[in-house]
Amino acid sequence: MTSTLLRAALVTACLAAPSATLAQPAPSRTSRPSIDPRAEKVLRDMATYLSRLENFQVQSETTDEIVLKNGSKVQQVTTSLVSIHRPNKLRSEQIGPGAKMTAWYDGRNLGLYCKSSNTYGVVPAPPTIDETLDVARRNYGVEAPAADLIYSQPYEVLTEHARSGQYLDVESVDGVPAHHLAFQQDDVDWQIWVKQGPQPLPVRYVITTKSMADQPEFTARLTNWKTDVSLPATAFGIQPPAGARRVAKLPSTCPQAG
């Protein structure tokens, strides 16, 4: 499990932001994971609910903890608006101060725009969101933060490497009662808070990378869920601003605009 992909650079920030993910090749497993039945039920309910959403939109504030050469830690915060139309459309746009990237996937192509350089790239993409997330990571080194929650079958992605899992408590996240779950893998620990009630949406997600010095954390705060939003197909088309320059490849880095 490698939790840092392009520390200077894509769902729940933008296809090309610093990120952590659990969707990595699995090591061989010799025993069944030890997961508390309560934790398993909450996670399955959440995953089933997410997988049944055909159209949704969510605002994501991600905090990526970066360890500098001198050992100091700094946090990079990014806010994005992510829109999904299953099975084959995605838009992720960084918003607010410091916004620098926008990504589009229209079922045929993946496009990425970098504000600071006013450049964009477009590459052919597979016919589904799942496959495109995999290709973006494998072929282009770009990652959708918290992409584990966007896959069509998130339970399998989240638990593929889990060794153990616990149900901790019901806690308040932004004033909303949420089930707090904690899971352990070989290289990472991760936690998730799932909204209590008939809409079991994830509201907070934390990954701690144990295999790296100082064990940096990635946090995603998920708010303003819209589970029945209907966006026109044009919202997912490649739409760089007027005057943007097309480059041969997807921008691999996108420095902060000055």
Image: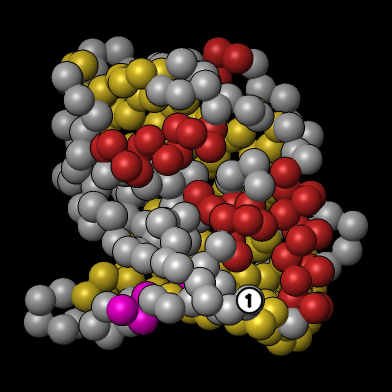
The answer to whether residue 234 is left or right of residue 75 is right
- Predominant secondary structure in magenta? strand
> Which residue is rendered at x = 23% and y = 57% of the image?
7
Q: Is residue 190 among the parts visible in the rendering?
A: no
The single residue placed furthest to the right in the displayed view is 198
The answer to whether residue 51 is left or right of residue 210 is right
Q: Position of residue 63 (x, y in %)?
A: 41, 65
Residue 240 is one of the magenta-drawn residues:
no
> Which residue is rendered at x = 24% and y = 83% of the image?
213
The number of discs equals: 1
Q: Quadrant of residue 226?
A: top right
Q: Position of residue 31 (x, y in %)?
A: 58, 78
Q: Position of residue 84 (x, y in %)?
A: 61, 33
Identity of the amino acid at label 1? Answer: Arg
Q: Is residue 46 among the parts visible in the rendering?
A: yes
Question: Magenta part of the protein: which range?
Answer: 206-211
Q: Position of residue 224 (x, y in %)?
A: 67, 50
Q: Quadrant of residue 250?
A: top left
Q: What scheme was used to colour the molecule?
A: secondary structure
